[in-house]
Image: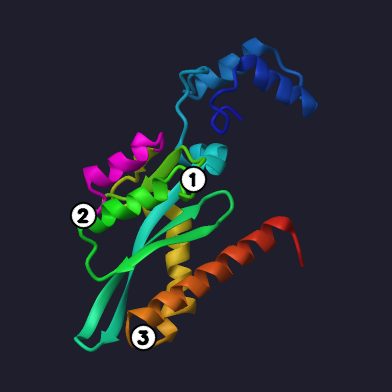
Amino acid sequence: MAEENPSWGHARIQGQLKHLNHRVARSTVAKVLKEHGIKPSPDRPMNWRTFVRSHAHMIAAADFFTTEVQTARGLVRYFTLFVIDIAKRRVHIAGTTANPASSWMEQIARNLADCDEGFLTGKRFLVIDRDAKYSPRFRSIPESSGVEVLFTSCLAPDMNAYAERFVRSIKSECLDQMIFLGRGALVRAIAEYAAHATTSAVIRASGTP
């Protein structure tokens, strides 16, 4: 209980145990926590899994995936940046380009942080990895709108698990099954899959058969 709920003090834990028909004194709770090296609230640290579960409705995560496209210039690699709402699993395709230059990234950031229609409206956190394309200028734009940008640790894909799962799904179920002739075909396929994934997530959340 203490590890999963960092804000719970001895009295709160004692009360929860009472609801489970375990009657123990607060001093016993304090002793057990001390024996296991768990600090008292509010000094108790929050692990990443607990943080995500507790703040899911305020978290969005961003990531890239790449796709090879046959064009008049030959085979071109396109980069697609997407953002996912952790709580609702809603996916927003931010953009697809063969050249994710800083100017393109900054415009994407402005679109995401737009106070009226931006995908980050109402969010407090944006989770990203340490890709150099997320430049200081890119990060400063959502931060100026009150969205804190959080980096995942190096070689820790589980810290961005929802985004990683979407990449795996769209690759295996859509992109790897098709040959794209031009950027337009790719953009349409990605948009249709993202809409399908979002609809499926809403249905699962609502319990609709």
Can the viewer see residue 158 in this picture? no
For the residue carrying disc 2, how many other residues have a C-alpha within 10 Å: few (<14), some (14-19), or many (20+)?
Answer: some
Can the viewer see residue 21 in this picture? yes
Amino acid identity at mark 3: Phe
> Which of 17/135 is in front?
135
Dot 2 or dot 3: first in sequence order is: 2
Residue found 47% across the figure and 79% down from its top: 174
For the residue carrying disc 1, how many other residues have a C-alpha within 10 Å: few (<14), some (14-19), or many (20+)?
Answer: few
Q: Kindly state the secondary structure of the residue where label 2 is placed.
A: helix
Q: Which residues are magenta?
A: 132-147
Amino acid identity at mark 1: Asp
Dot 3 or dot 1: first in sequence order is: 1
Q: Are marks 2 and 1 in contact (CB under 8 Å)?
A: no
Q: Position of residue 80 (x, y in %)?
A: 35, 66
Q: CA distance from mark 2 to mark 3?
A: 26 Å
Residue found 47% across the figure and 62% down from its top: 165
Q: How many marks?
A: 3
Q: CA distance from mark 3 to mark 1?
A: 34 Å
The picture quadrant where one finds residue 4 is top right
Q: In this figure, which residue is indicated by the disc labeled 2? A: 102
Amino acid identity at mark 2: Ser
Q: Position of residue 136 (x, y in %)?
A: 23, 42
Dot 2 or dot 1: first in sequence order is: 2
Is residue 10 toward the left or the right of residue 74 in the image? right
The vertical placement of 64 against 28, above or below, is: below
Q: CA distance from mark 2 to mark 1?
A: 24 Å
Q: Position of residue 30 (x, y in %)?
A: 58, 15
Please identify, in this view, whether the residue under mark 3 or under mark 1 is nearer the observer: 1
- Which label was assigned to residue 180? 3
